[in-house]
Amino acid sequence: MMLPMNPLLLLPPETAHKAALWALKSRLVPACPPDAGSLRVQILGREFSNPVGLSAGADKQAEALPGWQRIGFGFVEAGTLMPAPRKGNTGTRLWRLPKQNSVINWLGLPSRGPDVFVRNLRRFTEDTRNTMPVGVSIASTEGKAEDFEQLAGLVAPYAAYIALNISCPNTAEDLGDTLQSLKSHIRAARNGAGNCPVMVKLGPTDDADVLKMLVHTALEAGAAGFIATNTVPHDKRALLKDAGEFEWPRNYQGMVAGGYSGPGLLPISLFMMSEMRALAGPKVPLIGVGGVQSGDDAVRLLKAGANLVQLYTGLIYKGPRLVRDIKEVLARS
């Protein structure tokens, strides 16, 4: 039998993820050669050895940071960190769409809580052998401003940046409550973060008016920059014009569930990145994420205005070699 490009695809999705984290923690992964000097990026007050990062959701507990550094990532966004331990959703929570090189994720923000996370993050950043910047995604299930302030304060001494995850409304008419909570959460996070930059991660949208109001509101509230974009939920499936045909999975209650990530996200990411660069100007840091599964994809996002790019789903199908392949294309271009 011919093995798939990534042998972990032979395992159930969550089992494969746990096995990958174990291998990374044990450093049983190939070491990537040192980065070419041409790949260095100065942003967010830090030097990144290359602009290719791991998106939030892959390392929820910041437990495998040395392994991610070993396979060549220029940075990692760890988390999402929650205010207290939580198990996440019940039943099957992760589905592969192999024909589309995509996944549907319904994990429900599982977390072991701040104590474990901060211990892992501190151990990595205080080891002088580690030079990879680490961003931290934070969230609150109840949307409490004090949760964002507390979590930001805990991770700020060790984080390159803090990311707040914001879901975009479907239309400009739905913005009212979102803008108020956005301002509240940014200000709270900044109170806790001190000098650590606070980035805002925006959910997928193709509405330029929505983006304009979100970007301007976030900048006025003190956001340092933006990350775009997040997974596409079922109620926004119309955005996935290039994702191909697939049946949306159902949870243990028989309801459609989860968010899509994969190549079908790239057109949305490109649109949002181009719009945000025009809105925010040339100096605001932007991180592009969604649909990056090749060096050409990364080049397109960088040309659209991103300073850094992130990936995750591509690793599931192509393995750690993908990081090196992307950097080789970027070095040539």
Image (cartoon, helix red, strand yellow):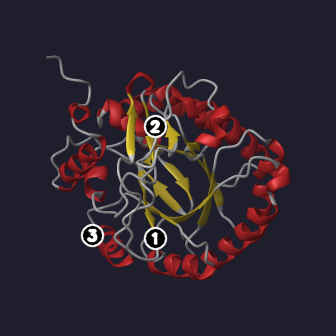
Q: Badge 3, how many Cα within 10 Å: few under 14, some, many 20+?
A: few
Quick one: label 3 or label 2, which is nearer the N terminus?
A: 3
Task: Determine which quarter of the picture holds residue 200.
Answer: bottom right
Q: Position of residue 5 (x, y in %)?
A: 26, 25
Camera-near label (2 vs 1) is 2
Disc 2 marks a residue whose amino acid type is Pro
Front in this rendered view, residue 173 or 114: 173
Local SS, label 1: loop
Residue drawn 67% across the image and 32% down it: 238
Residue 127, labelled with which disc? 3
Residue where numbered disc 2 is placed: 249
Q: Is residue 37 left or right of residue 12?
A: right
User: What kind of residue is marked 3?
Assistant: Asp
Q: Taking the image as drawn, is residue 323 in sight? A: no
Front-most of residues 176 and 327: 176
Give x and y (percent) for residue 289.
54, 43
Q: CA distance from mark 2 to mark 1?
A: 26 Å
Closer to the eye: label 3 or 2: 2
Say which residue appears at 33% left-offset and 44% top-offset. Answer: 72
Q: Residue 206: x and y, percent?
A: 74, 38
Q: Is residue 208 above or below residue 78?
A: above
* Nearest to N terminus: mark 3 or mark 1: 1
